[in-house]
Amino acid sequence: MTAELPNLSLYQLDDRLVELIQYREERLYDLQSPADEEELRTLDVEITKYLEALPKKVTGVVSVFRLWDDRESNIDAQIMRLTAAKLRISKNRERLKSYVAEILDRQPEPVKGCKKLEGVDGSVLMLKKNGGLAPLKIQDDVLPDEYRTTEIRLPATYVADVVAQFPGAKAGRTEPDNGRIREALKTGEVPGAWLTERGQHVEIR
């Protein structure tokens, strides 16, 4: 009446057990063709098999979860160790670069190019100026509002017809408008904003 119990999953075992119990109840109270004692004994034997198999299956499933938990914990521990090792290497690299930058900065200014030191094997350490835009510094309590932008949140139904005042509008964050500030600094001063040196970095070849 049943499949081989060891081949059934936990879900199948539980499902079949419920079916057997319900079927026994139906046969027990079937008024037209009631089950005899032999049939009920057979059903009881089958139900007992499932009741005995279910805890074993639960134990097996729980052991799998525990195994996976242990493996995840071991992996997490390895990740932490590797992350710490990577961080140490990164800090050591930056520390060494700062030492090299100090040494290179003491060298005489070359007629052409950047300051550099060459190794006997042709390797080179160079001190180069950083490219890109000069870093922009902002003093928030001094910067005028004309150099700021504010995010406005409002119901979508008002977007098509923008009006001076619209119900439900909410002001979001107000932030410096870096693009407008940079343009203004090209021709004059902006209170609370200024450009700093691009800095320099060590390049290795």
Image (cartoon, rainbow, N blue to C red):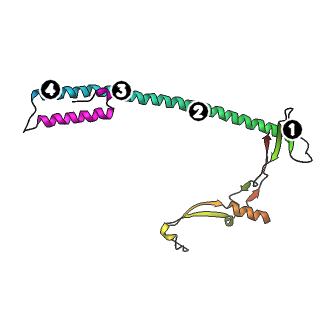
Horizontal side of residue 51 vs 158, given as left or right: left
Q: Amino acid at mark 1?
A: Leu
Read off the residue under disc 2. 80
**Answer yes or no: do the residues labelled 3 and 2 have beta carbons within 8 Å?**
no
Read off the residue under disc 1. 117
Give me the C-alpha separation between circle 3 and circle 1.
Answer: 67 Å
The mark tally for this picture is 4
Give me the C-alpha separation between circle 1 and circle 4.
Answer: 94 Å
Q: Which mark is residue 59?
A: 3
Query: Could you tell me which secondary element the residue under label 2 belongs to?
Result: helix
Q: Amino acid at mark 4?
A: Arg
Give percent across and percent down for residue 47. Answer: 21, 29
**Any magenta on residue 15?**
yes
**Answer yes or no: do the residues labelled 3 and 1 have beta carbons within 8 Å?**
no
Horizontal side of residue 118 vs 74, given as left or right: right
Q: Which mark is residue 41?
A: 4
For the record, the magenta segment spans: 3-28
Sequence-first tag of 4 and 3: 4
Report crowding for label 2: few under 14, some 14 to 19, many 20 or more residues within 10 A (C-alpha): few
Give me the C-alpha separation between circle 1 and circle 2.
Answer: 37 Å
Query: Could you tell me which secondary element the residue under label 3 belongs to?
Result: helix
Figure quadrant of residue 102: top right
**Answer yes or no: do the residues labelled 2 and 4 have beta carbons within 8 Å?**
no
Give percent across and percent down for residue 72. Answer: 50, 32
Report crowding for label 1: few under 14, some 14 to 19, many 20 or more residues within 10 A (C-alpha): some
Report crowding for label 3: few under 14, some 14 to 19, many 20 or more residues within 10 A (C-alpha): few
Would residue 190 be seen by someone viewing this image from the given angle?
Answer: no
- Label 1 or label 2, whichever lies nearer to me, is 1
